[in-house]
Image: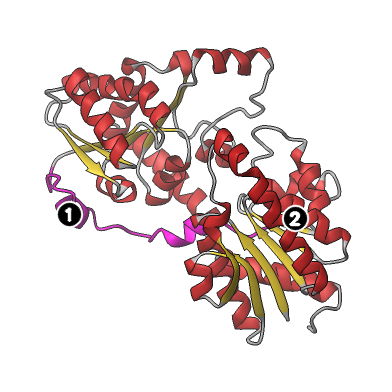
């Protein structure tokens, strides 16, 4: 068995390594080759190109590197056409992988796409692009397969890899000690985003909310993880300007540890909401676009979902308070955080819902993904049952 596989960033490299190990358990003689990072290479994948070859972020950067990326894709097409693998697996990186998958599928090679693009949030017609490129899509969210099935495409829910990676329980006392936070007392985490533009829009608002909350509940401590050294400096400036007397600890990195150490969190909608859900940290979610971007979203009705945070999308209800754009105010968000800290019933209800959602996503994604790939190959006679 020979398997082509392409992953273009760190998260894809980790995902690919888990899938390779799970497939190797079932097919010990399988060979893997493609675009691989250090994790996939350690799992036994031959790297035709290193994963960083595809790791380009931002529109202008992509345009600058487009000739090189297209050249890499053409060379991969030639390689896999000349010596066809039994199956080709593209992991995330849809802008690169879907075109590659479509071409290889037309050449008669079975194709799999691992991690569906967010077709449920925006550009829903991408379902056709994915469906025409891949014989099988491995979905990490439970509601995604039905979106493909409506159009006659095959998708299988395998669970979310992050849910498997986050432990069931965290040692809060240990985490607080490591982060230099008080062992006792109440700690509220503030996560205003992992990009500079997000922190510029939300940083002051989150600090204002913390000050509102501290006035209502004296003795609170706050903790902010900074995703990068650059954001660390930006947050330092914001604290000096807007909340110089706030009892806040600024931590470089370690966002998951900060969530584990906190009693509640105010966060920008995104992956952080998923991490808070898995760590079981009660949360309030906020997000603000630029005024121009928000006007465009409203004018063209681009937001196709009733909620923006993943916990609410999974629960199909307002499990987690959300404050978007002009509704995001210090008093409104502070009041919800205060309720989660002081009202055991409200806190318990949210935690119960978050626990149920975590169980839903924790499915052993590596193993289920491997089983789905092999089932597809068995149906084609490529492997024996």
Q: Residues within 10 Å of mark 2 (few under 14, many from 20)?
A: many
At which x and y percent is residue 248? 17, 33
- Mark 2 lies on a secondary structure that is helix
Which numbered circle lies on residue 100? 2
Q: Which residues are magenta?
A: 155-184
Question: What residue is at 58 percent from the left and 74 percent from the top?
Answer: 45
Q: Is residue 160 visible?
A: no
Say which quadrant the N terminus sits in: bottom right
At which x and y percent is residue 5? 66, 66
Identify the residue position indicated by label 1 in the image: 178
Inter-mark Cα distance, 2 to 1: 45 Å
Q: Is residue 22 above or below residue 12?
A: below
Q: Residue 228: within the magenta?
A: no
Determine which quarter of the picture holds residue 336.
top left
Label located before the other in sequence (2 or 1): 2
Q: Is residue 203 above or below residue 373?
A: above
Q: Residue 160: within the magenta?
A: yes
Question: What residue is at 21 percent from the left and 21 percent from the top?
Answer: 211
Question: What residue is at 71 percent from the left and 67 percent from the top?
Answer: 372
């Amino acid at each position: 068995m020979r398997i082509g596989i392409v992953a273009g960033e760190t998260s894809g490299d980790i995902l690919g390594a888990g899938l390779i190990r799970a497939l190797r358990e079932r097919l010990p003689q399988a060979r893997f080759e493609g675009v691989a990072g250090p994790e996939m290479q350690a799992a036994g994948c031959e790297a035709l190109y290193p994963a960083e070859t595809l790791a380009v972020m931002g529109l202008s950067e992509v345009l600058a590197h487009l000739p090189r990326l297209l050249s890499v894709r053409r060379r991969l097409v030639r390689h896999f056409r000349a010596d066809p693998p039994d199956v080709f697996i593209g992991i995330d990186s849809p802008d690169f992988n879907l075109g590659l998958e479509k071409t290889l599928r037309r050449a008669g090679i079975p194709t799999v796409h691992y991690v569906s693009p967010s077709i449920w949030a925006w550009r829903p017609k991408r379902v056709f692009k994915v469906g025409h490129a891949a014989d099988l899509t491995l979905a990490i969210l439970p509601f995604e397969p039905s979106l493909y099935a409506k159009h006659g495409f095959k998708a299988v829910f395998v669970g979310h890899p992050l849910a498997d990676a986050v432990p069931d329980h965290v040692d809060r006392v240990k985490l607080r000690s490591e982060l230099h936070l008080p062992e006792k007392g109440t700690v509220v985490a503030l996560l205003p985003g992992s990009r500079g533009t997000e922190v510029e829009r939300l940083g002051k608002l989150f600090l204002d909310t913390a000050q509102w909350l501290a006035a209502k509940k004296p003795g609170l401590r706050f903790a902010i993880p900074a995703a990068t050294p650059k954001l660390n400096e930006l947050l330092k400036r914001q604290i000096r300007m807007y909340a110089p007397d706030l009892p806040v600890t600024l931590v470089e990195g370690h966002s998951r540890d900060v969530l584990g150490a906190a009693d509640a969190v105010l966060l920008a909608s995104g992956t952080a909401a998923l991490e808070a859900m898995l760590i079981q940290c009660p949360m309030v979610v906020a997000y603000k676009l630029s005024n121009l971007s928000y006007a465009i979203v409203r004018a063209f009705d681009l937001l196709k979902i009733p909620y923006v945070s993943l916990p609410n999308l999974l629960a199909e209800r307002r499990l987690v308070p959300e404050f978007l754009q002009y509704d995001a105010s210090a008093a409104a968000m502070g009041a919800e955080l205060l309720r989660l800290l002081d009202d055991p019933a409200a806190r318990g209800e949210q935690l119960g819902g978050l626990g149920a959602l975590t169980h839903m996503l924790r499915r052993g994604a590596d193993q289920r993904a491997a089983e789905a790939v092999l089932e597809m190959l068995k149906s084609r006679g490529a492997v024996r049952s």
